[in-house]
Image (tube, rainbow, N blue to C red):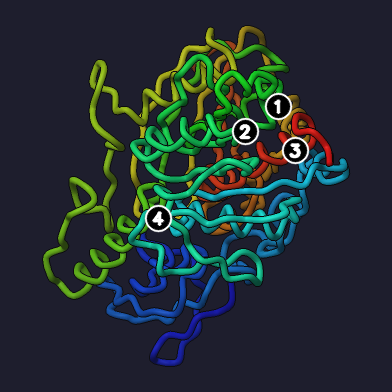
Amino acid sequence: MRNINLHKGARHRLAGVGCCFFPCRESNIKSNFYSLATSRLCLASLRLCVDAAPRSNQRCIQKGLPRRLGGLRIGERPGRAALDETVKNEPMTRCKVAVVGATGAVGKEILNLLATRRFPATEVVALASARSTNSVVMYGDTMLPVRDLAEYEFKGTDICLSAPGASVSKEFAPRAAAAGCIVIDKSSQFRMEPDVPLVVPEVNPHDLKWHSKRNIISSPNCTTIQMVVALKPLHDLGTIRRIVISSYQAVSGAGKEAMIELDQQARAHCAEATPQCEVFAKQIAFNLIPQIEDFSYEDYTKEELKLTHETHRILDPQIKVSATCVRVPVFNCHGESVNVEFEESVSPEAARAALSRAPGVAVVDNPTEGAYATPIECSGRDEVFVSRIRRDSSIGNGLNLWIVSDNLRKGAALNAVQIAELLVRDYLQRT
């Protein structure tokens, strides 16, 4: 990240403003989560205004942070993980693809990834609700007209990458599947249905072999994805008995209106006005909210129960899981503090070695040099970053981990696209 100018001419590094990162104009949030453009945020404590530059593809060199993150220079685009290299080097079927929810944040990122990863599509169709049919979305350098999901006939479409809400998926996905289209759905609608595979390609790609039962594949919750990617190599190493997770989840996980609310509340706070709460139950700016989704069984929230149930389906039903999910005033990237108890002893050194070899994982763990992952460095990147790997001295066979990942990329769009890549490589008839 480049230097930013203070109005009085001083120069500083941006390492986070209070507890709100990357303030941006409302119109820019609506148009693109990854283009958090120039804006002003008045700091209540310092009474200063800063001009924050766009963060995409820029160097992120901050005071107190290492110039390199896990062997990659901060701000560089990461190379593909081992899993992606395998998929990329295999011949793949060319197919027609539809993207549902194409005007949303995840839908736009799916289109971006399909283009940048050179997915073998003969045609890409952008679908959304009727109110979006007069708009266009970008697929690489091509502008795609948005078509009405309700009127679209899925016959002849090979794969549908779906990123709407659960109610929309419940209505259209069976119709698409009945027409012969394989639906990869990001919503929560089908995750716990026993005849629908719930897949993270780095963890359980073998479950794709029974996708034809309903022609629907479910992609897990964002917090689950990054956690199981990091836990899989450790589970193979020492058999995990129990995990205790506290998540620190960015507002982008609640959608663009949540990002707008954080921005507006920060502005109101700095202007000594009363912040308005519409998306969240309590003020999110300069605050923490220990509730994500509604409260449910034994006073756990639905988000916390998702972590438990999805981990059981994807990784191992015998692992005991206890979760606390917290919404934090950060625009993008979820962080997780995970305490892991094993059946047998696993040293931090052995854990680092296993994680360093794992597909999709980047180990950033040198505390003496300030090398650990934070949302600022990890935003816009594909890897799941693991830091602060250390022994838990309170139990016999325990480790503590800090896990960070971009919830809009690996936590949503990238996972779906990786599933599609495995489908065309291994399961669709080659043409």
Return the disc, 2 or 4, that comes first in the chain's sequence: 4
* Image point (41%, 53%), residue name: 252
Mark number for residue 389?
2
Return the disc, 2 or 3, that comes first in the chain's sequence: 2
Looking at the rendered structure, the secondary structure element under dot 4 is loop
Residue type pointed to by label 1: Ala
The answer to which quarter of the image holds residue 240 is top right
Q: Position of residue 431 (x, y in %)?
A: 84, 41
Mark number for residue 424?
3
Looking at the rendered structure, the secondary structure element under dot 2 is strand
- In this rendering, the answer to whether 308 lies above or below 378 is above
Residue type pointed to by label 3: Val
* Image point (87%, 42%), residue name: 91
The residues tagged by marks 3 and 1 sit, at their Cα atoms, a distance apart of 33 Å
Could you tell me if the residues under marks 3 and 1 are in contact, i.e. CB atoms within 8 Å? no
- In this rendering, the answer to whether 16 lies above or below 386 is below
Return the disc, 3 or 1, that comes first in the chain's sequence: 1
Mark number for residue 158?
none
Q: Residues within 10 Å of mark 4 (few under 14, many from 20)?
A: many
